Amino acid sequence: MNITIEELEKLEPGTFDVIDMRGETEIAHGAIPGSVAIPEQELLENPPENTGKKLIIVCSRGRVSVDVSEELCGRGYEAYSLEGGYIGWLMNEMKKQEAEEICESVEKSIRKKFHKSIWSNFTKAVRQYELVKEGDRVAVCISGGKDSMLMAKLFQELQRYSKYPFEVEYLVMDPGYSPENRHVIEENARKLKIPVHIFESDIFDSVYNVEKSPCYLCARMRRGHLYNFAKELGCNKIALGHHYDDVIETILMGMLYGAQVQTMMPKLHSTNFEGMELIRPLYLIREDDIKAWRDYNHLHFIQCACKFTDTCTTCNNEETRSKRVEVKQLIAKLKETNPFVESNIFKSVEDVNLDTVIGYKAGGVRHHFLDTYDEKGRSADAGNQEKTDGKTDKKADKKADEKAE
């Protein structure tokens, strides 16, 4: 059985429970207030006690939830599939909000409530890593999620109060979004008064049948299109919304799964687009602070605008997201006994002691400690000999002085 959003809003409080079957990552980007997160498999294998309350089953777009609600009805529950799913509910919520009021509130919260945790860290990263310079033309790349939308608002604030002139273009690439997801992005841009340029590609169709690492290929192709379109607009930089937590997770993932020490750099020169740079202005901002900003302003974003999210393995399968989830859980566990573990991971790649590293690569060339080991040993021996000779000379001088007296 189905239930519309309008019908849901008319139900008496306490007579129903909303169960969200979406994945942990999707729910982290937004959920219906008061909903309970229960994965699909767990819901079917171990459903909650039947108390007589209506069960409103929610997935991303109201498709998977239909079969689940029918299964539960067959077991004696009064279960309903929410038409349109979370995306439908989100679009309905967005219609209730006025752009002028929302935009003013969002900008004020950046200047006041989140000045220290967000604005100060944003401007610190811009200064510390020299991300934006006078005369730059920056393409701020918006995917539709909380991170890139916040980054767009921060750039508007920076441009408003900056002491030096620079230009900004706000880009949204549509690689084949579903109409619902594209509408959510457009509506959020309208409410937040972000003047977006939307250009289209067919990337989703290109990677749909790719079995090995489709998300990785999709990301690489999207970045190439963004560079190309940004360059057409006269931009010399593209800005992506990776934050502090992305950085420390990347460091650990490189060690644990890639057998290498590396980090996500705050800026990079493009190797394929001459004169272009990639910058990451949210580099010092914590994800929890971004979530707090989103929730404080009652904003709702989507995690991934991929039109296949409900039905394919491109975004939802355990293999593609389990590594990052495992690293998140590992960091959280370590933090229980060491509250400084996150900052220590972050700082570890800023204080690398090459004298204690077996091997490293610089400029595409591999180096090994044995390359200079014997040479350093001879230098050390020579240094020790000089110290010994110096001590002998001092003793001789002292004896000569004593005789002279």
Image: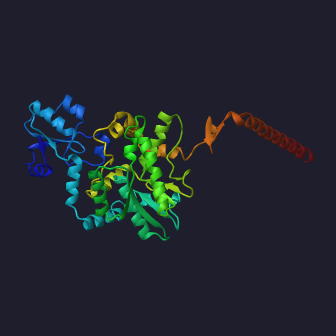
Instruction: Give the farthest residue toward the top.
Output: 45
Quick check: can you spot residue 280? no
- In percent of width and height, residue 373 lies at 71, 34
Quick check: can you spot residue 286? yes
Relative to 256, 73 lies left or right: left
Choose top left, top right, bottom left or bottom right for residue 48.
top left
In which quadrant of the rendered image does the N terminus lie?
Answer: top left
Q: Compared to 240, does 367 lie above or below?
A: above
- In percent of width and height, residue 230 lies at 47, 59
Choose top left, top right, bottom left or bottom right for residue 81.
top left
Relative to 200, 253 lies left or right: right
Applied colour scheme: rainbow
Instruction: Give the farthest residue toward the right.
Output: 404
Number of numbered tags placed on the structure image: 0
- In percent of width and height, residue 205 lies at 37, 44
Q: Nearer the viewer, residue 124 or 126?
A: 126
> For the point 45% across and 47% down, which residue is it?
221
Q: Nearer the viewer, residue 262 or 205?
A: 205
- In percent of width and height, residue 136 lies at 51, 65
> For the point 7% across and 37% down, which residue is it?
52
> For the point 52% across and 58% down, which residue is it?
128
Q: Nearer the viewer, residue 277 or 27?
A: 277
